Image (cartoon, helix red, strand yellow):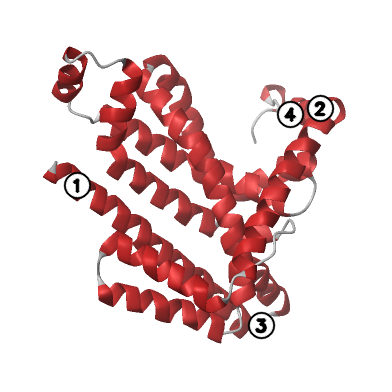
Amino acid sequence: MFPDSFHISIRGPINTAVQSLVVNYGFVFKAISQTILQAILFIEWIVRGLPWWLVIIAFMVLTWQATRKVALVVIVAVMLFVIGALGLWDLAMQTLALMLMATLISVAIGVPMGIWLAKSRLMRGITLPVLDVMQTMPSFVYLIPAIMLFGLGKVPAVLATIVYAVPPLIRLTDLGIRQVDGEVVEAATAFGGSPRQILFGVELPLATPTIMAGLNQTIMMALSMVVVASMIGARGLGEQVLNGIQTLDVGKGLEAGLGIVILAIVLDRITQGFGGSKLEDGQNG
């Protein structure tokens, strides 16, 4: 047995720090929670209010724009129709709204952070170990501080999803910027380009395929958190899977799981398609 004299615990200080945040800055977290909640409800209002056939058409258009493949467009339409045929349409739209909100916030955090890491070796050395911890920490752990700071519901579910899903986008944005050919950057500098112009006119466009790969991974990881997020009040397909587990209803859980898989496949093909088209444009340019 390990000697008790060497035993240390970080539980007490961490709990004290979180409780201090709740007591002293609860109003800040409440304001953040209300802002995110209103944004989620707005996205839900859109995707749940639109006719099902219009949503399918919108996904078909996105698929065509991303891939230019008629067969894949038809497959996407059929797969989305299957979600509706299984009676999961409204739940799928709730899940889609939560995932879109998490993805939007992840992009707002991940892309600027990735650019910062690419430009600062010190920041990169500090942040990469933190990202390692974020990716390897069990996803259930993120639910505890999220519940303490934001209560139960959609907001803590989205924030816990962001913490789990944003690291790939940060890493691949950093990688994409650093992989831009130095000679191209030197040429842009020689023509009088400012750092800002070079970033937005040269580096980000050339890094877009890699960034899109990071976005793809972020979306997939966000969807993988659907069932976990349902444990703290997030509605949608994840809640259906959780109910299936609780009632030992295999069919119910399998149906909802199939809906999650379909959403994952559709979004994966669209983001991969956009990333591939950007790569082809860069090679042709």
The x and y percentages for residue 51 are 58, 75
Mark 1 residue type: Asp
Q: Earlier in the sequence, mark 2 or mark 1?
A: 2
The x and y percentages for residue 269 are 35, 63
In space, the residues marked 4 and 1 are separated at their CA atoms by 49 Å
Classify 10 Å Cα crowding around label 2: few (below 14), some (14-19), many (20 and above).
Answer: few
Q: Nearer the viewer, mark 3 or mark 1?
A: 1
Q: Nearer the viewer, residue 58 or 24?
A: 58
The residue carrying mark 4 is 14
Q: Secondary structure at mark 2?
A: helix
The correct choice, above or below, for 32 with respect to 228 in the image is above
The quadrant in which residue 1 appears is top right
| Left or right position of 83 against 66 | right
The residue carrying mark 1 is 281
In space, the residues marked 3 and 4 are separated at their CA atoms by 39 Å
Q: Earlier in the sequence, mark 3 or mark 2?
A: 2
Mark 3 residue type: Asp
Q: Nearer the viewer, residue 38 or 167?
A: 38
Q: Earlier in the sequence, mark 4 or mark 2?
A: 4
Q: Do the CB atoms of the residues marked 3 and 4 lie less than 8 Å apart?
A: no
Q: Do the CB atoms of the residues marked 2 and 1 lie less than 8 Å apart?
A: no
Q: Earlier in the sequence, mark 3 or mark 1?
A: 3
Mark 4 residue type: Ile
The residue carrying mark 3 is 249
In space, the residues marked 3 and 2 are separated at their CA atoms by 42 Å
Q: Do the CB atoms of the residues marked 4 and 2 lie less than 8 Å apart?
A: no
